[in-house]
Image (cartoon, rainbow, N blue to C red):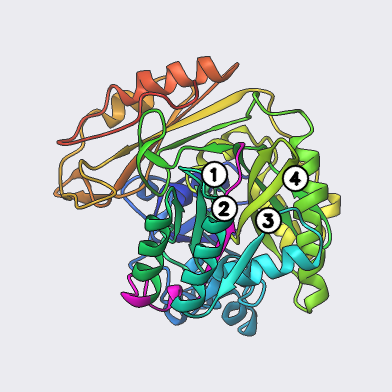
Amino acid sequence: MRVLVVGGGGREHALVWKLAQSRHVDRIYCAPGNAGIARLAECINLQATDISGLANFASAENIDLTVIGPEASLIAGIVDRFEARGLRAFGPSTDPARIEGSKGFAKELMVRYGIPTAPYRICGDAESAHDAVRRHYAAHPEPGFRIVIKADGLAAGKGVTVATSEEEAHETIEAMMVRRVFGEAGDRVLIEECLDGHEVSVMAITDGETVVPLAPAKDHKRVRDGDQGPNTGGMGAYSPVPTLPDTIVRDALELVLKPAISAIRDLGIPYKGVLYAGLMVTSEGIKALEFNCRFGDPETQVVLPLMEADLFEVMDAAVNGRLDEIDLAVSDQAAVCVVATAGGYPGEYETGLEIQGLDRAAQLESCTVFHAGTRECDGRICTAGGRVLGVTAVGKDLSAASSAAYMAIDQIQFAGMHYRRDIGG
Ligand code: AMP
Ligand code: GLY
């Protein structure tokens, strides 16, 4: 089989790495890929959002299955365009992908179908948003009362502010709705009650009927140790999450993922692909924070190394509506991924810096260095993005996996390199 993976980050490197182990896959292409992916797949000079270019390529090269990484391509309708040309693609079409593309759509669906989530209001203009905030703080004058403000549309993972004062909440509304820092994504905002608890992500693969959960994972979004500093795309992840109750996957499946998939089916277009649920485990049980219409990054870099099933078989079955025939075996080991970023990220950072020690790190047992923002320059590997690498290690438990991941990342250097020291405990 010939497979095309769309995207070029750490998540796509993990997808390519796992698909390369499939007994069905003989050839993998990746668009645009990165320097690490280039060792396993032929990288194609097409951007993930160049839907016509990608469909022309898949058609000309007789690609059997295209796997889409980034949400922007899914929301822009890549799967619809591929299917219209008779090309098979793994991922939801544009209509169900709205579950990530519009937080308002996702919330309405949750409320209508009884999926537990934080109470919210949706506001289409700054005046009503300010008003909602004023009323919230009038009802809760206690210092430090928090409220969550979310831009409705896609904002590169930056569209959520957990405000810790009324002033910050008003300022966030001004930034989103008046100064429009996220463009049209902030034309509507959600004002949401802040939940307390432990966050966890559970992804599931679905053909629209059968929903198969993957191992739960914990992402670390803040840039510095101890969950300090600004939010990022993700500084590391681990799986499983032993501090959470054993019922977490069953609850995520029965209370959140299955109801969401059947709600979308009721709307007309079945959901195929991966559905990612961001959850808060509260004292009242689990609540859904958000949905993503794709694999998480860096969660994929810990979940796939623990998957024993053949990923191509799973994806092929999902696309063919035969997921009920698949046994998705998962190893009982643990995996930890530590992300190395450019100095300055998530603010301004330099690129083009040479990376050293990659081969030494890759030689360590049970370690895999997934590339994110890297490219080849004059025969060397250089940085090309904010999140540069994700070093994953598998071990008998989290502590063994974490020690191995840190031993591997300590072999790697580039100027300004930063990583958290507290991933995986
Ligand atoms: P989202 O993109 O909706 O997952 O939001 C990004 C991050 O904001 C989440 O991972 C949580 O850390 C936080 N967050 C979102 N909604 C809430 C909420 N209702 N209560 C507390 N934290 C939240
Ligand atoms: N790691 C969070 C995400 O992929 O959205």
For the residue carrying disc 1, how many other residues have a C-alpha within 10 Å: few (<14), some (14-19), or many (20+)? many
What is the quadrant of the N terminus in the image?
A: bottom right
Q: Which residue is mark 1?
A: 300
Q: Mark 1 or mark 4: which is in front?
A: 4
Dot 4 or dot 2: first in sequence order is 4
- Element assignment for label 1: helix
Mark 2 / mark 3, whichever is N-terminal: 2
Q: Nearer the viewer, mark 4 or mark 3?
A: 4
Q: CB atoms at circles 2 and 1 under 8 Å apart?
A: yes
Q: Secondary structure at mark 2?
A: loop
Residue range (magenta): 178-197
What residue do we see at 83% from left, 74% from top? 266
Residue in the image at 55% along x and 70% along y: 101
Mark 4: which secondary structure? Answer: helix
Q: Earlier in the sequence, mark 1 or mark 4?
A: 4
As drawn, the label of residue 7 is: none
**Is label 3 in a helix, a strand or a loop?**
helix
Judge the density around disc 4: few (<14), some (14-19), many (≥20) Cα neighbours within 10 Å.
Answer: many
- Mark 2 C-beta to ligand 2 under 8 Å: yes
Estimate how packed mark 2 is, as few (under 14), some (14 to 19) or many (20 or more) residues with alpha carbons within 10 Å. Answer: many
Disc 4 marks a residue whose amino acid type is Ala
Mark 4 or 2, which is nearer the eye?
Answer: 4
> Residue beneath label 2, please?
295
| N-terminal label among 2 and 1 | 2
Q: Is mark 1 within 8 Å of ligand 2?
A: no
- Distance in Å between CA atoms under marks 1 and 4: 17 Å
Q: Residue under label 4, please give it.
A: 252
From the viewer's perspective, is residue 297 above or below residue 31?
above
Instruction: Judge by depth and name the residue closer to the eye, 97 or 176.
Output: 176
Q: Which residue, given by chain and number where applicable, does mark 3 sit on?
A: 315
